[in-house]
Image: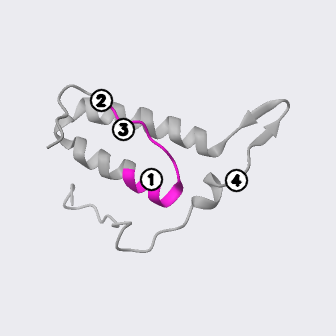
């Protein structure tokens, strides 16, 4: 647990709300604009994970696990950060 006082759920071991139905939806078209929930989620999480890895490079393994979990649970592909401090062992 990263923050002792915060009660966090482990999505691998505990049941959490299934939001995959939103990432599996077809694209939405609103006034000639195409909106893909899956692409929006992927872009947002890629940006957030990159920023968080840049701020706390020692936690990059945590974000890598979160990337894998997002792919398994929601089918969302999140690009790796590729920061120089990340060395895979």
Residue sitting farthest toward the right: 31
- Mark 4, residue position: 25
For discs 3 and 4, the disc positioned in front in the rendered view = 4
74, above or below 57, in the image? below
How far is the residue under mark 1 from the one under mark 2?
18 Å
Identify the element where label 3 is drawn.
Answer: helix
- Mark 3, residue position: 49
Of callouts 3 and 2, which one flags the residue occurring earlier in the amino acid sequence?
A: 3
Q: Tell me where residue 51 sits by quadrant.
A: top left
Q: Do the residues labelled 4 and 1 touch (CB within 8 Å)?
A: no
Q: Do the residues labelled 4 and 2 touch (CB within 8 Å)?
A: no
Of callouts 4 and 1, which one flags the residue occurring earlier in the amino acid sequence?
A: 4
Query: Along the line of sight, which residue is nearer the eye, 77 or 3?
Result: 77
Q: Tell me where residue 72 sits by quadrant.
A: bottom left
Q: Give the range drawn in magenta.
A: 68-81
Q: Which mark is residue 61?
A: none
How far is the residue under mark 3 from the one under mark 4?
24 Å
| Screen quadrant of the C terminus | top left
- Mark 2, residue position: 82
Relative to 39, 85 lies left or right? left
């Amino acid at each position: 647990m990263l923050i002792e006082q915060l009660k966090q759920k482990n999505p691998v071991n505990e049941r959490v709300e299934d939001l995959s139905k939103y990432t599996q939806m077809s694209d939405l078209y609103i006034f000639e604009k195409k909106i893909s929930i899956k692409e929006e989620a992927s872009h947002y999480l890629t940006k957030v994970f990159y920023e968080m890895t840049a701020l706390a490079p020692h936690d990059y393994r945590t974000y890598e696990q979160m990337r894998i979990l997002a792919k398994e649970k929601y089918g969302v592909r999140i690009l790796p950060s590729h920061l120089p401090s990340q060395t895979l062992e």
